[in-house]
């Protein structure tokens, strides 16, 4: 495996890049269930110090992709395609419902922020240098659409589902930015029209399309 070649400017996002690489390798099945990830070994393979490897493994533990055990290190616990199916089917159902219920509570400031976030996202090209910014904008965009939903348990379930793979999906599917942006454009339009049914439908479509692309990425299709 080739090493990362990083400029001084890139070092600010070193941990992000290391985490993205290890996440991708785990999801693509490059490791066996129960395989140990040794910090020294991966620091050498990726051409970095142990610190970003250690921090990356901690993040991957939060996402459920590894378990860090005393005296054993990080043990791989990869997410299966069945896990992805479950997470994204639930997201589609719950986020679609929440967006439909929230739409009549959105105000002018919400619409302005949605448009600002959308404009910022379409100004990005999905490159490695911009992906971290896109992920933050994307998560906020989706959050605005459901914040006003009166069902707090539903929002709690959605928040739980977002902890892990969904937040980082854009880094795994950089070739699908154009399709995502078209869907985001429609989501803004339907929200401003207060058309809850259409907003629910495009939200579900957006999430389920992402699910299919993610499953295909994992399977190598």
Image (cartoon, helix red, strand yellow):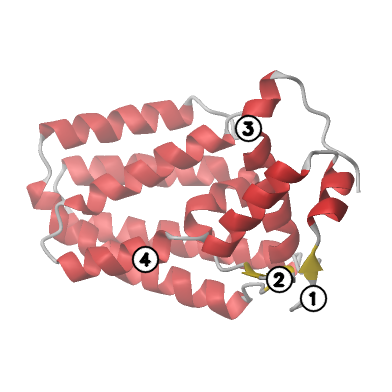
The disc at residue 160 is 4
Relative to 180, say whether 37 is above or below: below
- Residue 132 % position (x, y): 54, 37
- Residue holding disc 3: 13
Query: Real-space Cα distance between discs 1 and 4?
Result: 26 Å
* Contact (Cβ within 8 Å) of mark 3 with mark 4: no
SS under mark 1:
loop
Going from the N terminus, do you reach mark 1 or mark 3 first? 3
* Contact (Cβ within 8 Å) of mark 2 with mark 1: yes
Other residues around mark 1 within 10 Å, as few (<14) / some (14–19) / many (≥20): few
- Residue holding disc 2: 76
* Contact (Cβ within 8 Å) of mark 1 with mark 3: no
Going from the N terminus, do you reach mark 3 or mark 2 first? 3
SS under mark 3:
helix
Query: Real-space Cα distance between discs 2 and 1?
Result: 7 Å
| Front-lying residue, 219 or 75 | 75
Going from the N terminus, do you reach mark 2 or mark 1 first? 1
Would residue 128 be found to the left or right of residue 192 on screen?
right
SS under mark 4:
helix
Corner quadrant of residue 144:
top left
- Residue holding disc 1: 32
Q: Residue at x 21, y 29 (%)?
A: 112
Residue reaching furthest front?
71
The disc at residue 147 is none
Going from the N terminus, do you reach mark 3 or mark 4 first? 3
Relative to 55, say whether 34 is above or below: below
Between marks 2 and 4 in the image, the one whose residue lies nearer the viewer: 2
């Amino acid at each position: 495996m080739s090493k990362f070649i990083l400029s001084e400017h890139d070092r600010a996002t070193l941990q992000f890049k290391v985490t993205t690489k290890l996440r991708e390798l785990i999801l693509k099945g490059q490791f066996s269930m129960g395989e140990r990830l040794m910090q020294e070994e991966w620091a050498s393979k990726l051409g970095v110090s142990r610190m970003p490897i250690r921090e990356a493994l901690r993040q991957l533990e939060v996402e459920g992709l590894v378990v860090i055990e005393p005296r054993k290190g990080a043990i791989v616990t990869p997410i299966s395609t069945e896990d992805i199916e479950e997470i994204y089917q639930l997201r589609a159902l719950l986020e679609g419902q929440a967006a439909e219920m929230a739409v009549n509570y959105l105000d002018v400031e919400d619409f302005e922020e949605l448009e600002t976030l959308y404009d910022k996202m379409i100004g990005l090209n999905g490159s490695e240098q911009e992906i971290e910014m896109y992920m933050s904008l994307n998560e906020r965009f989706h959050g605005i659409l459901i914040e006003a939903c009166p069902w707090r348990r539903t929002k709690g379930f959605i928040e739980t589902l977002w902890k892990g793979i969904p937040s980082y999906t854009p880094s795994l599917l950089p070739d699908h930015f154009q399709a995502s942006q078209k869907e985001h454009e429609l989501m803004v339009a339907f929200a401003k029209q207060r058309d809850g049914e259409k907003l629910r439908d495009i939200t579900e479509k957006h999430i389920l399309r992402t699910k299919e692309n993610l499953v295909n990425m994992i399977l190598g299709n």
